[in-house]
Image (tube, rainbow, N blue to C red):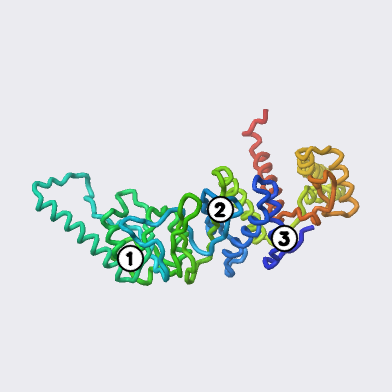
Amino acid sequence: MAVPLELSDRESLIKSASTSLNSKVVSQYSTLLAPLAVDSVLSVVDPAKPDMVDLRDIKIVKKLGGTVDDTQLVKGLVFDKKASHAAGGPTRMENAKIAVIQFQISPPKTDIEQSIVVSDYTQMDRILKEERNYILGMIKKIKATGCNVLLIQKSILRDAVTDLSLHYLAKAKIMVVKDVEREDIEFITKTLNCLPIANIEHFRVEKLGHADLVEEVSLGDGKIVKVTGIKDMGRTATVLVRGSNQLVLDEAERSLHDALCVVRCLVSKRFLIAGGGAPEIELSRQLGAWSKVLHGMEGYCVRSFAEALEVVPYTLAENAGLNPIAIVTELRNRHAQGEINAGINVRKGQITNILEENVVQPLLVSTSAITLATECVRMILKIDDIVNVR
């Protein structure tokens, strides 16, 4: 009863993503979020491994303000923080050469806890001069490569940048985005097609990423940094989710993640089936017919398995406030007459061809659920000496 699906059939993919969104709080935005989920998953599919999609390649950035209607797919990078404005540094950079650094542009500290006693002003001047020279030396090396945008990883040992280093970076016309989280580094480097730089001595031109534009954009009450027009961009996508309050924002993120999972299932196994309890009741009917052919214990087991599958349409009818016994009986009759796509239409409160109503789900969802449930029961039966069911 499964319908084959091609990834080029965008409409069918959007229908299945919409089905998952229709039961969510943000269901009224399904016409926006479903195409967005489909486009983001298709943009990260690797032709070398067409059946594999890693959802870590799709980054969801939440920003308070606006409405869910303002949610957008960004072909590039988005940072939920503003560029460093200290000492009047640039906030917009065209033809950007971007470096992702994991070292600190600040004076070094001693390896062990100790105090340095300064007895006169000349020694203090020497320390400050050395600090300046140390930072200037680092910034000259960075500037020599042509780098004009720095993404600095958050440091737990000492300040990643100081006011002095930000002052010199601003003078060198280098845009700075600081406090980049450690777990985001892999995604950023994959998107920019560059390498993270762990030491100033390893700062090379070939380790830089290139983009047409890096700019700070005002959004709601705050600001974000957008990187667009990335050259040789990796197979990643960024979704900027907006919402009027934190609850809507979190719900939109969860709903979008569900839709992404649905599309990923369809990429892994390219078949669609009808929803509304249709696959379970059809499977139950077929297994019931097969159980009559089998003899003894096997026939009894298959029949019980078939009866157990009816709990899905029964529960669906119950949750929809319908009469579950009457609905499941009618559903069974319709399937016996050959209507394999007949399912429970919750909105109309009756049995209809659920495929025509665009209530569809990936084949992988149903097969995984049945397989995992069966394996779970087998495990429990194997250890029934240990597990005492009271």
| Picture disc at residue 173 | 1
Q: Earlier in the sequence, mark 2 or mark 3?
A: 2
In space, the residues marked 2 and 3 are separated at their CA atoms by 29 Å
The kind of residue tagged 1 is Lys
Which image quarter: residue 199?
Answer: bottom left
The x and y percentages for residue 254 are 59, 48
What residue do we see at 88% from left, 54% from top?
Answer: 338
Relative image position of residue 269 (x, y in whole percent):
68, 60
Quarter of the image for residue 268 reads bottom right
Is disc 2 surrounded by few (<14), some (14 to 19) or many (20+) residues within 10 Å? many
Ranked by sequence position, the earlier of labels 2 and 1 is 1
Give the distance between the C-alpha atoms of the residues marked 3 and 1, in whole angstroms: 53 Å
Residue type, numbered disc 3: Phe
Crowd around label 3: few <14 · some 14–19 · many ≥20 (10 Å) = some
Lateral position of residue 123 relative to residue 217, left or right: left
Q: Nearer the viewer, residue 377 or 112?
A: 112
Mark 2 → mark 1, Cα distance in angstroms: 31 Å
Foreground mark, 3 or 1?
1
The answer to whether the residues at label 3 and label 1 have Cβ atoms under 8 Å apart is no
Residue 43 appears in view = yes
Can residue 294 be seen here?
no
On the image, numbered disc 2 is attached to which residue?
241
| Residue bearing mark 3 | 271
